[in-house]
Amino acid sequence: MISITNLSKQYRQHTALDGINLRVQKGTILGLLGQNGAGKTTLVSILNGLTPYNQGEISIFGLPLKTNLREIRQRSSFIPQSFAFYENLTVMENLRFFAGIQNIRGKQLRQSIEQAIATNRLDNMLEQRAHALSGGQKQRLNIAIGLLNDPEIIYFDEPTAGIDPELRNSILQTIHSFKDAGKTIIYTSHYMQEIEQICDEAAIIHHGKIICHAPVATLLTKDGQQTTLESIFLKLTTRQKATC
Amino acid sequence: MLKQMLQKEFSLVLRDKHSLAALFIMPFIFILIMSMALKDTFNSERALLSYEVIDLDNSLDSKTLQDFMATSSFLYKPKKGDNRDIHLSLTIPEGFSASLLEKKAAPLLQLSAAPDVKQEMVLIFQAKISADIMRLRLLQIQKEIAPFLPDTAPQLDLDNFIAEELLQINYRGMQKNEQPTSTQQSVPSWIVFGMFFVIIPMSTIFINERKQNTLMRMASMNISIPALFTGKIVPYIVINQLQVLLMIGAGVYIVPLLGGDALTPGHSILGLAMVSLSLSIAAIGTSVLIAVLAHTVEQATTVGGLINILFGAIGGVMVPKFYMPQSMQTFANISPMSWGLEGFLDIFLRGYGAQEVLRESLALSGFGMALLLLAAFITTRRMNA
């Protein structure tokens, strides 16, 4: 579904991504782990065609990204960490706006909005202005907007940052439910436990390179011993261990 | 897609009370205040100068001279108990009457002027007194020649010397008996100023979209930069045109209710539309560029406000250009507000049409388009970094 070969991105003197190779299969939830500035957001941004890259090949849905950006964007969705909607519009107005600019109309518009509302349990707050919502409700709206085009791939950038633990769990359950609908999820987070909880695979990015990519279950039972992603992450990033 | 962008932008602006106040209430209040405050400046019937006469001659001629002065609409002689400052004090010396027709080395009259009286006012007074003295002299000559020309001399009607009968004044583009008013000057000024205040809602929304990654999200939904800019420009053009209509309405209907002069909006709807649309492009271009360059909403509103005030002060919005010295009037031409103001004054005040405002309209549109292209270039470069 997603194929990245030898991808590099340079910001003037700084190398953000350095020879990234990655394959993600359909229906997989891939957790992208890395310290701040490791290159997670740059990678997700490149995959959404928001940032140009210097070198490498990317194909999504079997289509080269550079020449099929429009179609690829129509079939995928990017959910930013910040609440990327309009605080002074109501929940319904926000949903209608973001559906409208994607040319979703008529019956499909109604169905998409109903689906997004139901999945994210926004029923009781449709006429409320977004600024009046709680942090968790705002994140639900943020996610709902990302579901309007019924994407096959969803990119989540730290969706639980700043959300209290109870709501975090509920958001994680919602995200995990997308797997059942056959969607592919790319999920960046600082929280290792979240990756353990919902991801099928984990990839650790360090200084612009992927230093580990493996199924989460394999990583957690390495050499027959139970371990944690946090422990693996720390060993790899502090060079106590060369590979996973 | 454009429909949704327009709906969104309108909803956001209409829900922002501060922006609405800056866009509609502020220029409306300025129009009311300035139309009333400057009312007398444009009124030819009002008294500009107060004066007193110290009559040491006490003759029929000195009394007649005072009668002539009393007919002037721009001179005011305070009554006893009126504490108004005296601007001019005219002394009629003893022997004035006797020396009226004599050629003397010493001046006929003495004038003492307060130091705050403008020089042009003293010159106007001097011209008035000269004309009155000439009338007195002619009256004396008339009396002296009457016995020799009994049929002709009395027909010289020198007692009824009315300026309006000698010179009829018509202002270009105005009906007979119409004259420029403070409303004609203040409505265009504050429309221009108010239109540039689109910087507040535009920058607030645009910078929030950028900071909240809403722009990034829209880009990931295949919204192109031209579509994004169109979605920004069109609503504010509509808002600017609403401002123009409402402010003209205020000048025509509300200012007269408060005792001011009604605005006469000119005769060229096409000319008005040309100035109004091109001014809107200039205001929006300035606003978009500031919104693109500023990092925070506070920065954009501060810089935008300062630029507006500077453009307004230089461009003749706050102080009408005719009050400025020639060098400042030339300097004023660097401000796009001055081009817009001249365009509106051409329509409202000078009664011109589309052809006469073409130059200003092209200059404003060119200025706005150049800034929009620069803003689009910077945005594209940032997105491709």
Image (tube, coloured by chain):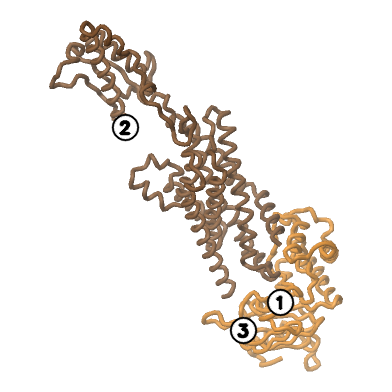
User: Are discs 1 and 3 less than 8 Å apart at CB?
Assistant: no
Q: Residues within 10 Å of mark 2 (few under 14, many from 20)?
A: few
| Residue A17 - label | 3
Say which quarter of the image contains residue B106: top left
Same chain for marks 2 and 3? no
**Measured along the vertical axis of the image, is residue B248 above or below residue B125?**
below
Q: Nearer the viewer, residue B98 or A15?
A: B98
- Circle 1 — which element? strand
Colour orange, chain:
A
- The residue that mark 2 highlights is B118
- Mark toward the viewer: 1 or 3: 3
The residue identified by callout 1 is A188
Whole-number angstrom distance, CA of label 2 to CA of label 3: 74 Å
Q: Residue at x 57, y 39 (%)?
A: B248
- Going by the numbered disc 2, the residue's amino acid type is Lys
The correct choice, above or below, for A6 with respect to B231 in the image is below
Amino acid under label 3?
Leu
In percent of width and height, residue A136 lies at 76, 63
Please report the residue visible at 51 percent of the width from the left and 47 percent of the height from the top.
Answer: B354
Q: Is residue A39 above or below residue B147?
A: below
Chain of the residue under the numbered disc 3 shown in the image: A
Instruction: Please state which of residues A176 and B288 is positioned toward the viewer in this rendering.
Output: B288
Chain under numbered label 1: A
**Badge 1 amino acid:** Thr
Chain B is which colour?
brown
